[in-house]
């Protein structure tokens, strides 16, 4: 019986507090990973936007339900991240705009895309009921030392 009593006394000395430090460390790492990856998931189509001095702010273009058309430099159209044939672009935009009050469509055109491809995209979506078209651009970075 001496052995059984000593094992019972040893079990009373067990520390029952939970150490949450490793869990907090893992959660912070996951948070940082998601913060870095989320902007990359928004725009899956790689497009180098035109750089301008004073871009117009369009915060609604970053919303999850915004309709964004990407025009690549080789003239392909993407609605969101899905490749769309030029003759289907108007019908797909029309389907997405049916129950909306804000009928704005944003175009992310590559800076080296042909102007005709961007014009064709706008011509294809206008009959779909689009009220406004926003052309997304990127701010031209300036040299801090010289101001140029």
Image: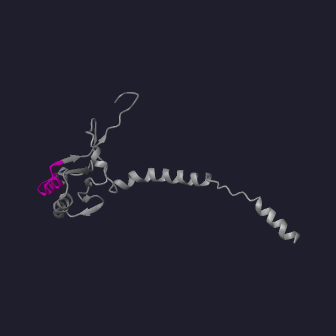
Q: Residue at x 24, y 51 (%)?
A: 113
Q: Give how far across and how far down residue 139 sits, in percent.
A: 31, 39
Q: Residue 128 at what x, y percent from top left?
A: 14, 57
Tell me the magenta residue range.
119-132
Say if the magenta span includes residue 32: no
Dividing the picture into quarters, in which one does residue 26 lie? bottom right
Q: Which residue lies most toward the top here?
A: 146
Q: What is the quadrant of the N terminus in the image?
A: bottom right
Q: Looking at the image, which is closer to me, 30 or 110?
A: 30
Image quadrant in which the C terminus is located: top left
Q: Residue at x 81, y 66 (%)?
A: 7
In the image, farthest residue toward the left: 127
Which SS type dominates the magenta stretch? Answer: helix
Residue 147 horizontal/vertical position (percent)? 35, 28
Q: In the picture, residue 71 is in which quadrant?
A: bottom left
Residue drawn where x is 80% and y is 66% of the image? 8
- Asked if residue 120 is among those painted magenta in the image, a careful observer would answer yes
């Amino acid at each position: 019986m001496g052995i059984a009593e000593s094992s019972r006394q040893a079990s009373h000395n067990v520390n029952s507090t939970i150490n949450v430090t490793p869990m907090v460390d893992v959660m912070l790492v996951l948070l940082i990973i998601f913060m870095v990856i989320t902007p990359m998931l928004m725009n899956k189509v790689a497009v180098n936007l035109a750089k301008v001095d004073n871009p117009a702010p369009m915060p609604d273009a970053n919303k999850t339900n915004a309709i964004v058309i990407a025009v690549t430099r080789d003239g392909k159209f993407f609605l969101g991240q899905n490749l769309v044939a030029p003759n289907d672009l108007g019908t797909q935009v029309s389907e997405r705009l049916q129950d909306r009050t804000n009928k704005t469509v944003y175009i992310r055109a590559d800076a080296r895309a042909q102007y005709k491809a961007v014009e064709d995209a706008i011509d294809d979506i206008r009959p779909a009921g689009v009220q406004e078209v926003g052309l997304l651009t990127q701010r031209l970075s300036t040299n801090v030392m010289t101001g140029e």
